[in-house]
Image (cartoon, rainbow, N blue to C red):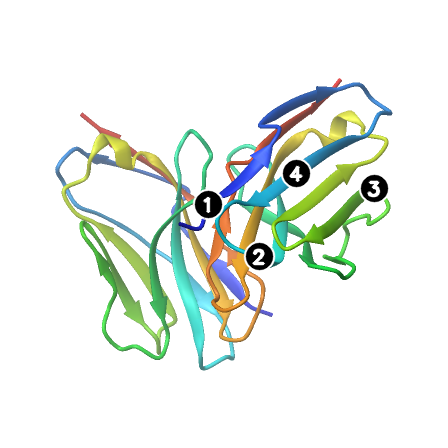
Amino acid sequence: GAVVSQHPSWVICKSGTSVKIECRSLDFQATTMFWYRQFPKQSLMLMATSNEGSKATYEQGVEKDKFLINHASLTLSTLTVTSAHPEDSSFYICSARRDRGYEQYFGPGTRLTVT
Amino acid sequence: AQTVTQSQPEMSVQEAETVTLSCTYDTSENNYYLFWYKQPPSRQMILVIRQEAYKQQNATENRFSVNFQKAAKSFSLKISDSQLGDTAMYFCAFMKQYGNKLVFGAGTILRVKS
């Protein structure tokens, strides 16, 4: 159990467009979801924490108007990169946590390339 | 604020041998959780092993074991009988007991050679 999926796994978009990434918990309800960004051979950088039904909490230095996060249900959180630019190209990973418990379950990640 | 330090950017080991990855952390908390995650070339994060700070006994999962030294704030991972499939980036991570966030170290790239 505790499977998290992400869609799409890879997306290419043109500069100036917006792209949405979905994160779903497939077999459990996730009251909290997390979005990370990872550059090649580097660690995961937490971007924001989202709780179902409330606004996301963004980490310092993360532009909330650029990275829109919506946690609309107990199984779905979305990250929308608005007006994407080449510097937004990265690997985005989500994770989800059950209501009771501390472990985070990770999705397989989404590779975003902005041309 | 908590910090996690992995001082070995890259390591290599021969197949079937044993390797130890180092991790130290800094915190003023007394109760917390520590984790080792594996990220293979597929980039899927996989939990390898976890340790609750209130437990004195070191955690073990098959070929993976930890050496948890609370006073020294050290949490090393030992991989026995290394296999080619162990080749991955390994991250040490910290979480406060009632916290939300995982704090990751910079990672160690482990290459298992045949």
- Amino acid type of the residue that numbered disc 4 sits on in the rendered structure: Glu
Q: Which residue is at 83% across, 22% downward?
A: A15
Q: Are marks 3 and 4 on the same chain?
A: yes
- The mark nearer the N terminus, 1 or 3, is 1
Vertical position of residue B35 compared to residue A6: above or below: below
Q: Which x, y percent locates residue B53?
A: 37, 75
- Amino acid type of the residue that numbered disc 2 sits on in the rendered structure: Ala
Marks 2 and 4, how far apart in space?
14 Å
- The mark nearer the N terminus, 2 or 4, is 4
Q: Which x, y percent locates residue A70?
A: 75, 49
Q: Label 4: chain?
A: A
Which residue is label 2 attached to? A30
Which residue is label 1 attached to? A3
Q: Which mark is residue A66?
A: 3
Q: Are marks 2 and 4 in contact (CB under 8 Å)?
A: no
- Amino acid type of the residue that numbered disc 1 sits on in the rendered structure: Val
Q: Are marks 1 and 2 in contact (CB under 8 Å)?
A: no
In the drawing, does residue B86 fall left or right of residue A31? left
Q: Are marks 4 and 1 in contact (CB under 8 Å)?
A: no
Vertical position of residue A25 compared to residue A51: above or below: above
Q: Which x, y percent locates residue A89?
A: 69, 29
Marks 2 and 3, how far apart in space?
24 Å
| Label 2 neighbour load within 10 Å: few <14, some 14-19, many 20+ | many
Residue B35: quarter of image: bottom left
Q: Which residue is at 68% across, 53% downward?
A: A73
In the drawing, does residue B96 fall left or right of residue A68? left
Marks 1 and 3, how far apart in space?
28 Å
- Amino acid type of the residue that numbered disc 3 sits on in the rendered structure: Lys
